[in-house]
Image: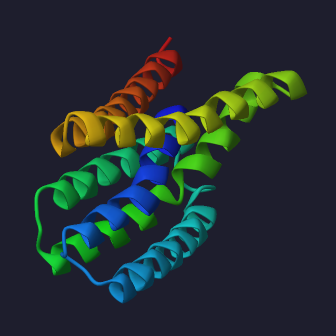
Amino acid sequence: LLFLYLGLENCVNGWFVTYFKSMDIMSSTYATNLVSVTWIMVMLGRLLTAKISSKVDKNKLISGYCVATTVFFILLTATHNLAVITVAIAGLGFFFAGIYPTTVSSVGNIIKGSTTGMSLFLAIAALGGIVTPQIVGFLADRIGMTAAILVLAFNAAGMLIMSGTNVLMRRKETHI
């Protein structure tokens, strides 16, 4: 899940803003401010996550964040309207915020203190943030924007499926 998440987050934070700027949908100044808005929303989202993570099941929280991320990603890719793009980017920042820390926290119970296990987990997750922007850029240059956006849609859908499956699996475990 984090492999897909970091790939999607890195592309939205860097690649999408550059794309919208190159399409003359927004100015350089607006793009710069939008990146700042994204990080403000990430900060607010992390504060909310810290507050509610002790009250809400972590797996359900991750799944809810993935659902919201998918909705805002669809909103982002479905328009060229600057106001809608702004809301979508802000929403993505807000709901991206809790995925990484909550997932790492929930995996801690599974890995149970294995520093090697956690190191491998985080390294594999980081690869998503490294590889996905390269794949997206390559496809955008060679095939076009539709192919590039499909990679990111795959990431969002994969996150949704994995988080939903995790909630269902945990539900079955509690009923056994």
Q: Position of residue 5 (x, y in %)?
A: 48, 42
Q: Residue at x 16, y 41 (%)?
A: 146
Q: Is residue 82 above or below residue 88?
A: below
Q: How many numbered marks are there?
A: 0
Q: Is residue 146 above or below residue 107?
A: below
Q: Nearer the viewer, residue 136 or 122?
A: 136
Residue 81: quadrant of the picture = bottom left
In the orientation shown, which residue stands out farthest toward the bottom?
29
Residue 151: quadrant of the picture = top left
Q: Position of residue 144 (x, y in %)?
A: 19, 41
Residue 91: quadrant of the picture = bottom left
Q: Residue at x 28, y 72 (%)?
A: 21
In the orientation shown, which residue stands out farthest toward the top?
176
* Colouring scheme, one of rainbow, by chain, secondary structure, one colour: rainbow
Q: Nearer the viewer, residue 72 or 146?
A: 146
Taking 125 as reference, is 12 left or right? Answer: left
Q: Is residue 130 visible?
A: yes
Q: Position of residue 36 (x, y in %)?
A: 49, 80
Q: Is residue 69 above or below residue 38?
A: above
Q: Residue at x 56, y 62 (%)?
A: 49
Q: Is residue 95 visible?
A: no
Q: Position of residue 149 (x, y in %)?
A: 24, 43
Q: Residue at x 18, y 55 (%)?
A: 77
